[in-house]
Image (spheres, grey):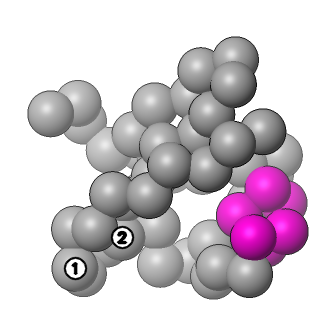
Amino acid sequence: MKQAKKLTVAMKKLINKNSLNPNDYWFIKNTCDQLVIIHKKTNKIIKIAK
């Protein structure tokens, strides 16, 4: 598993657009077609299409 990192402003906007709270998530991987984030407390991985 990769090291989790803080979200950028553009990533936070994308997460808000999908009705999620960006303060609860860490950034894992950002590819050209999707953003992979993980919940800080439950460790649930979520993939968001761009």
Identity of the residue drawn at 24% across and 81% down: 41
Residue depicted at x 70% and y 17%: 32
- The residue that mark 1 highlights is 42
The amino acid pointed to by label 2 is: His
Let me know if residue 17 is in the magenta part: yes
Give residue 19's quadrant in the image: bottom right
Is disc 2 placed on a helix, strand or loop?
A: strand
Q: Check contact, mark 2 vs mark 1: CB within 8 A.
A: yes
Q: Decide whether the magenta segment is chiefly helix, strand or loop.
A: helix
Front residue (pair 28, 49): 49
Which residue is found at the position 33% from the left and 57% from the top? 45
Q: Is residue 18 visible?
A: yes
**Residue 29 painted magenta:** no
Q: Which mark is residue 11?
A: none
Q: Secondary structure at mark 1?
A: loop
Magenta stretch, residue numbers: 13-18
Query: Which dot marks residue 39?
Result: 2
Residue type at tag 1: Thr
Number of numbered labels in the structure image: 2
